[in-house]
């Protein structure tokens, strides 16, 4: 299993993927930097993922950047956990019955 993918949380909404890439590049080769955005609004959600080229580089980045500041926010950086397999139609299916009337089309 490759543990080179990192979760990066508590990001400023002003942080760009280039900012992330620059911050992590000091600790190794950044393969990919992704900021997560809200599907509906397109606004940043305040977290993202950075993939380093090796698990060693990823660990070095965690050691150096977890708790450090970027754009005035204290980062949370750790090895990303693989997404759990969800049965059926994904996690949204069964929840719909609890959503009440505000989500009707």
Image (tube, helix red, strand yellow):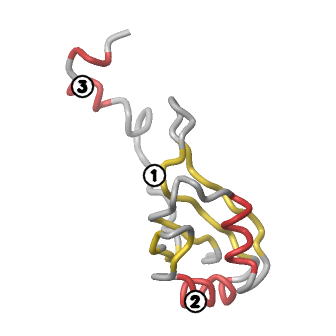
Provide the secondary structure element on which disc 3 rests: loop
Q: Is residue 28 left or right of residue 20?
A: right
Residue under label 1, please give it.
85
In front of the other: label 1 or label 2?
2
- The tag on residue 57 is none
Which tag, 2 or 3, sits closer to the chain's start?
Answer: 2
Asked whether 26 or 92 is in front, the reply is 26
Quadrant of the snapshot with the N terminus: bottom right
Quadrant of the snapshot with the C terminus: top left
In front of the other: label 2 or label 3?
2
Mark 2 closeness class: few <14, some 14–19, many ≥20 residues within 10 Å: some
Give the CA distance from mark 1 to mark 3. 23 Å
Taking 29 as reference, is 64 above or below it?
below
- The tag on residue 64 is 2
Q: Position of residue 70 (x, y in %)?
A: 56, 72
Q: Position of residue 86 (x, y in %)?
A: 42, 46
Taking 74 as reference, is 104 above or below it?
above
- The tag on residue 99 is 3
Give the CA distance from mark 2 to mark 3. 42 Å
Q: Residue at x 38, y 33 (%)?
A: 92
Q: Position of residue 56 (x, y in %)?
A: 67, 90
Q: Residue at x 50, y 70 (%)?
A: 72
Q: Residue at x 68, y 69 (%)?
A: 51
Q: Residue at x 66, y 57 (%)?
A: 16
Mark 3 closeness class: few <14, some 14–19, many ≥20 residues within 10 Å: few
Q: Residue furthest front?
A: 72
Which tag, 1 or 2, sits closer to the chain's start?
Answer: 2
Q: Position of residue 22 (x, y in %)?
A: 74, 72
């Amino acid at each position: 299993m490759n543990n080179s993918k990192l979760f990066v949380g508590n990001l400023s909404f002003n942080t760009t993927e280039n900012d992330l890439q620059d911050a992590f590049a000091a600790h190794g080769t950044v393969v990919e930097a992704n900021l997560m955005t809200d599907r509906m609004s397109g606004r940043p959600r305040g977290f993202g993922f950075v993939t380093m080229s090796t698990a060693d580089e990823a660990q070095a980045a965690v050691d150096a950047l977890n708790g450090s500041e970027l754009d005035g926010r204290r980062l949370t950086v750790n090895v990303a956990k693989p997404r759990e397999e969800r049965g059926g139609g994904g996690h949204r299916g069964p929840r719909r019955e609890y959503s009440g009337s505000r989500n009707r089309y």
